[in-house]
Amino acid sequence: MNPARSPILIVGAHRSGTSATARGLEILGLQIGQRLDSHREPKALQQLHEAYLKRFGAAWHRPNAFLESIQTKEGECQCREYLRENLRGQFASIFGYRRNPRGWWLLARLKLGALWGWKEPRTTLFAPAWLRIFPEARIIDVVRHPVAVAKSIRQRELEFRAGGDPPTPGLNELDYCLDLALTYINSGGTLATSAAHYRRIRFEEIQADPTEKLKEIADFCGLRFRRAQLERSAATIRPESSSPWQGFSEATARELLSRYPGVAKLGYGWAGAP
């Protein structure tokens, strides 16, 4: 399968607003497949990424060993060939296209120049290899307050455990989740110098002005849409419901910022902090 255009990759940490961003762009005409989970992700792509992470004893929530490898020339080459080899025979299934008339029609649209892409947070880690396969890919790097991301990851883990799921080590600890969020954010940030087309956006900006910010991102992608589509897309974005610092005392917030200076470097501070 050889699409006429390079893909649009929506990257960012888990729980950072990438699902809402993907859903909004899909309404504006971005083709992202059929067989998607509730987070707008192709299950087969998740499995493809996770299977390779396991080769290093890594996982989406424990990516450091893999990152050490892909940052080397040899490691990046091996990862690229793994992805390329799987794409040769499984392009449709990997990106969530069904073997039915609509799926065949959607794949045909790719050959005719339809704008397409995908959203899957592990792509943030694998992007150096994906960019070797699709050097003209457009990267949309969605960033959310790292503390909000960490709290959301931890809350989801606690809910999974309460529902009877086996525990994922570390994800019940805020510090672990904050380190994880910053790892993804930093990985996404490195793409600014390696991708031919890169745009970073804060999810809070999308929440504050969804009509204008979704339009900006859609224009970056080259999407064409009607005003009614933009209004419908913007209506899917929920406003921020609470501060990331809710439940933190001043002393705890200051202490956390002192241990994680990367949070402030991203422009995310605390209103009471210096």
Image: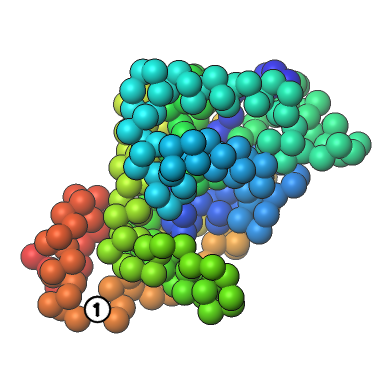
Name the outermost residue toward the left: 274
Q: Name the amino acid, label 1.
A: Phe
50 lies above or below 149: above
Q: Residue at x 31, y 78 (%)?
A: 246
Please indicate whether residue 244 sits to the left or right of residue 130 in the image: left
Does dot 1 land on a helix, a strand or a loop?
loop
Q: Which residue is mark 1?
A: 248
164 lies above or below 64: below
Q: Residue at x 36, y 39 (%)?
A: 65
Q: Residue at x 42, y 27 (%)?
A: 128
Please indicate whether residue 158 sits to the left or right of residue 244 in the image: right
Q: Answer few, some or many: residues within 10 Å of disc 1's Cα (few below 14, many 20 plus, some between 14 and 19).
A: few
* Among the 4 quarters of the image, the one containing residue 98: top right
Residue 202: tell me if it is visible. no
Q: Residue at x 53, y 35 (%)?
A: 52
- In the rendered image, the quadrant that contains the C terminus is bottom left
Please indicate whether residue 35 sits to the left or right of residue 253 in the image: right
Please indicate whether residue 2 sits to the left or right of residue 10 in the image: right
* Among the 4 quarters of the image, the one containing residue 146: bottom left
- In the rendered image, the quadrant that contains the N terminus is top right
Residue 70: tell me if it is visible. yes
Residue 157: x percent and y percent? Answer: 47, 68
Residue 235: x percent and y percent? Answer: 60, 62
184 lies above or below 199: below
Residue 257: x percent and y percent? Answer: 16, 63
